[in-house]
Image (cartoon, rainbow, N blue to C red):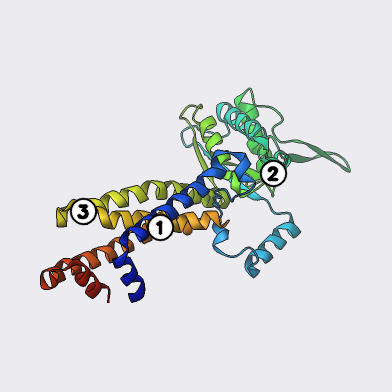
Amino acid sequence: MNRLAEKAIKSPKIYIWTTAIITIVIIILVALPMLTEKFANILHPLTIDTDPESMLAYDAPVRVTHRAKKKEFGVFDLMAIGVVNKTHKNGVFNKKTLNKVYDLATYAKSLQWKDKNNKTEGVLGVELISPSNVDNIEQGGPGTVKFNWLMPKPPTTEAEALEVFRKIQKQPILKGSLSSSDGQALALYIPLSSKHVSYKISALLKKRIASYDDEDEFFITGLAVAQDTFAIEMFQQMAITTPLAMILIFGLLWFFFRNITLVISPMIIAIVSAIVTMGLLIVTGNAIHILSSMIPIFIMPIAVLDAIHILSDFYDRYPQFKDRKKAIQFVMS
C-alpha cells in the first residue's frame, strides 16, 4: 500500500486518468449490449434476477429438492383473489357480484403470451379454480352421477346466485375453500406458468378490478405474488434510494466542511467505486439480484468515510510539514 501511495504521489495524473479511463470503459461495456443487439451477442447484457431463491446457489440442496418435489407432485406457482361483500344480505352470492367474478375469471384465463423462446407464459387457464371453472358433482338418478359446471354462465337472478352457494355447500372439497360458510367471501385460485409473471398478472388484474364498482372488496395474494412484488419493488426502491443517499451525503459534507473541493473529492470516489463494482458484476456475466442491488448503498458511505478520514488527517498534518507530499506520505503511511 505504501509503495502504491508513493507512486501515486509522484505521478498523480497517471492514476487519475487511469481511474477515469477504466470507469468510462466499464460504462461503455455495460451500455453497449443494451443499446444494440450486435454487441448483446458478444458482451454480457444487464441481467436482473428478481427471484428471492437466487440468494441461494441454483444447485443448493434445498433448491434442488424443492424443484424436484414441485415437478413430482405437479405443483404450480399460484396466486389467489379473495372477493368479499359484507353489505349484501347474501354476501358475494348475489347477481351483481357473481357477474364480476365470472368476468374476472374469464379475463384471467386470457392473460397468456409467448416469451422470446415461443413458450406460453401467463395464467394456466385449464388449471384455474373459480365458480365458472370447477365441476359440480350431483346424483343424476339411481346409480348415476352427473357432472356439470358449477356456474356455466353469469346468474341473471338472485335465485340463481343463491343456487351457486347451495351447490358449493354440498361439495366437501369446495366448502370452506372456494367460499366461506357464511357466503360473505369467495376465492379464485389462479395458477401461473412461473412466479416471475405474477407481478405482471397481478397488475393487469388490479386494472380490471378497478373498472368495477366499490360494492365488493378484492384482495390479491399468494406466495408467488409476494416474492415477485417484493423483489421488483425492492429494485425500484434501490433505484430511488441510491441517488437520494448520494444527495444526503453531499448535503452533510457541505454542512460540515463548507468547502467544495473537500466535498466533491469524496463524492467522486464514492461514485467511481459504485460504478466500477456494479459494472464489473455486469460485465463478467453476473446477474444483479436483490442483495447485490444493495451494494452501492453500502459502498458509498464506506468510500466517503475513508476519503474524509484521509482528507481530515491531511489538513491536520499539513501545518506541521508545510509540504503537501510529505503530509500525504505521513497520512498514507
Disc 1 residue type (three-letter):
Thr
Residue 164, position in %: x, y?
Answer: 66, 34
Disc 2 residue type (three-letter):
Lys
Task: Decide: few, some or many residues near mark 3? Use Cα within 10 Å; few <14, some 14-19, many ≥20.
Answer: few
- The residue to which callout 2 is attached is 170
Q: Is residue 57 left or right of residue 304?
A: right
- The residue to which callout 3 is attached is 261
Residue 266 seen anywhere in this rendered image of the structure: yes
Task: Decide: few, some or many residues near mark 2? Use Cα within 10 Å; few <14, some 14-19, many ≥20.
Answer: few
Residue at the image point whose x is 30% and y is 67% from the top:
10
Q: Secondary structure at mark 1?
A: helix
- Tell me if residue 297 comes above or below residue 79 in the rendering: below
Query: Which mark is first along the chain, 1 or 2?
Result: 1
- Give the quarter of the image for residue 199: top right
- The residue to which callout 1 is attached is 18
Residue 183 seen anywhere in this rendered image of the structure: no
- Depth check, mark 2 against mark 3: the one in front is 3
| Total tally of numbered discs in the picture | 3
Q: Is residue 267 left or right of residue 194?
A: left
Disc 3 residue type (three-letter):
Thr
- Depth check, mark 2 against mark 1: the one in front is 1
Query: Which mark is first along the chain, 1 or 3?
Result: 1
Judged from this view, the residue extending furthest toward the right is: 143
- Tell me if residue 68 comes above or below residue 89 in the rendering: below
Q: CA distance from mark 2 to mark 1?
A: 77 Å
Q: CA distance from mark 2 to mark 3?
A: 78 Å
Q: Secondary structure at mark 2?
A: loop
Q: CA distance from mark 3 to mark 1?
A: 21 Å
Residue 258, position in %: x, y?
Answer: 14, 53
